[in-house]
Image (tube, helix red, strand yellow):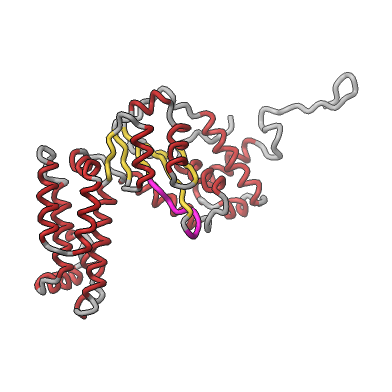
């Protein structure tokens, strides 16, 4: 509009931002389509606009949602930290999530001690950090060291998923070693790694044949099943039950299993905490799967900034829409 002095004055309408070329109504539609498609290119095609327009809306709405979010008065008793591969090679991000809400609190590039500390300090206030009672994670040393320094009152819980995963990896290593001498172990990977209740009839028959042959791999699988039973044995004697399991596992003299038992013993506090509590990284692992879906649908992300905004846009529980 032209002012009384003849100069042109820019006026911001209530239906659009003064710095954008699209209306709030268009932004609403773009956010809804992004949520449905999880694909910026497809959303741009449907709305007949450029990719850069949709990418900017994703970043702006995420930034707006993070600015609106105020968790400073909440108490986070339990947190989860997990890693996710970012690009090919050893490029990772660290994801901090809240299992009770299923939301990602924030994401930081890399999985070093410094990046993990930055992530915790920017996500929670000093008072909140002191009130965290438990944190679920795998046995990655920088995560453990950072939690011990930054969360003074939190117990570290090495979640069930990763503990069983280590045993599964040991079982598969034994299978690959033994298959060179025993041809009937070919194509037995899934029969050995699946939980018994999930086996198909064909896989069950295959496993029964392996068990009857008394191979080391069937003994290694029994070690895993014995460990899984600890989670339903009650927590009154968790440390005693774990020690019995470890002693029985080492008596079988399977080198791959011995390595896992040794690792568990080095982190025995976090392992026993997993037996004592019902807390685990199940929600974090589901989020990990959803983040992988974002990567697959979006055909990868070239920059960390784009990846972080996408993760928080879809899984941050944010208020994204313009008002």
Residue 130 included in the magenta stretch of the image: no
What is the count of numbered marks? 0
Give the quadrant of the C terminus.
Answer: top right
Q: Which residue lies furthest to the right in this view?
A: 6
Out of 265 and 44, give the one closest to the viewer: 265
**In this picture, residue 52 sits left or right of residue 256:** right
What residue sits 40% from the left and 48% below the top? 83
- Please state the extent of the stretch shown in magenta in the rendering: 82-89
**In this picture, residue 288 sits left or right of residue 21:** left
Out of 62 and 154, give the one closest to the viewer: 154
Could you say where residue 190 lies in the image, as x and y percent from the top left? Answer: 25, 67
The image quarter containing residue 187 is bottom left
**In this picture, residue 177 sits left or right of residue 132:** left
Could you say where residue 123 lies in the image, as x and y percent from the top left? Answer: 45, 32
What residue sits 52% from the left and 56% below the top? 300
What residue sits 27% from the left and 35% below the top? 155
The image quarter containing residue 215 is bottom left
In the picture shown, does residue 42 fall above or below 278?
below
Residue 87 included in the magenta stretch of the image: yes
What residue sits 47% from the left and 26% below the top? 70
**In this picture, residue 102 sits left or right of residue 298:** left
Give the quadrant of the N terminus.
Answer: top right
Q: Main secondary structure of the magenta part?
A: strand
Could you say where residue 315 lies in the image, as x and y percent from the top left? Answer: 45, 42
Could you say where residue 302 lies in the image, as x and y percent from the top left? Answer: 57, 54
In the picture shown, does residue 251 fall above or below 290?
below
């Amino acid at each position: 509009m032209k002012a009384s002095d003849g100069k042109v004055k820019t006026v911001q309408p209530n239906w659009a931002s003064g710095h954008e070329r699209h209306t709030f109504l268009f932004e609403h539609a773009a956010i809804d389509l992004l949520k449905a498609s999880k694909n910026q290119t497809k959303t741009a095609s449907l709305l007949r606009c450029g990719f850069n327009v949709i990418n900017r809306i994703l970043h702006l709405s995420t930034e707006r949602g993070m600015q609106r979010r105020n968790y400073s008065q909440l108490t986070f008793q339990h947190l989860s930290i997990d890693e996710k591969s970012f690009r090919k090679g050893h490029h990772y991000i660290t994801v901090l999530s809240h299992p009770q809400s299923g939301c990602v609190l924030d994401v930081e590039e890399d999985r070093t001690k410094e990046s993990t500390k930055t992530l915790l300090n920017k996500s929670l206030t000093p008072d909140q950090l002191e009130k965290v009672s438990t944190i679920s994670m795998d046995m990655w040393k920088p995560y453990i060291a950072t939690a011990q320094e930054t969360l003074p009152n939190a117990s570290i819980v090495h979640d069930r998923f990763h503990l069983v995963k280590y045993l599964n990896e040991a079982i598969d290593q034994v299978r690959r070693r033994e298959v060179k001498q025993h041809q009937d172990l070919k194509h037995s990977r899934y029969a050995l790694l699946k939980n018994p209740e999930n086996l198909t009839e064909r896989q069950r028959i295959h496993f029964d044949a392996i068990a009857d042959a008394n191979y080391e791999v069937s003994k290694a699988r029994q070690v895993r099943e014995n460990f899984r039973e600890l989670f339903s044995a009650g927590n009154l004697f968790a440390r005693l039950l774990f020690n019995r399991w470890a002693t029985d596992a080492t008596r079988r003299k399977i080198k791959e299993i011995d390595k896992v038992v040794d690792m568990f013993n080095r982190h025995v506090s976090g392992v026993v905490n997993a037996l004592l509590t019902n807390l685990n990284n199940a929600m974090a692992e589901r989020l990990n799967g959803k983040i992988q879906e974002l990567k697959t649908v979006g055909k990868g992300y070239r920059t960390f900034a784009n990846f972080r905004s996408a993760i928080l846009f879809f899984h941050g529980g944010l208020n994204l829409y313009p008002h």
